[in-house]
Image (spheres, grey):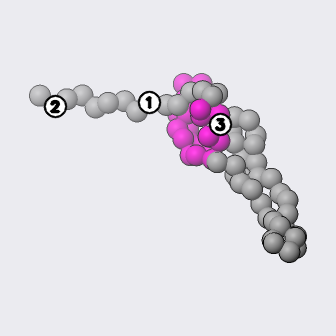
Amino acid sequence: MAKVCYSCGKGPSFGNARSHSLRATRRRWNPNLQKVRIREGGATKRVWVCASCLKGFKVQKAVRPVPAAEA
């Protein structure tokens, strides 16, 4: 599976790194992807989501059930 955002499809960008002498070498800019548990269709799954989608509430994070207190 490629490392792309599950919500918006954002993936790596490519370009040139420029040194002081302006020599160009190829490089890659990766998105800020976080592995999160989301709730979708009543099921919980772990997917890669970019930080901008998390901050914009574009995905619904799953909440773990709290175990009952032993008494």
Pointer 1: what residue?
63
> Is residue 11 at all visible to an observer of this figure?
yes
Furthest toward the top, the residue is 41
Residue 68, given in percent of the width and then of the height, sits at: 24, 28
So how many labels did they put on this image? 3
Crowdedness of circle 3 by 10 Å Cα count: few (<14), some, many (20+)? some
Furthest toward the front, the residue is 20
Q: Is residue 50 above or below residue 39?
A: below
What residue range appears in magenta?
33-55
Q: Residue at x 76, y 48 (%)?
A: 11
Q: Which mark is residue 52?
A: 3
Secondary structure of the residue carrying tag 2 is loop
Residue 24, given in percent of the width and then of the height, sits at: 88, 70
Q: CA distance from mark 3 to mark 2?
A: 39 Å
Secondary structure of the residue carrying tag 1 is loop
Q: Residue at x 44, y 30 (%)?
A: 63
Examine the image and state in which quarter residue 25 appears. Answer: bottom right
Sequence-first tag of 2 and 1: 1
Pointer 2: what residue?
70
Q: Is residue 7 above or below residue 26?
A: above
Which mark is nearer the camera, 1 or 3?
3
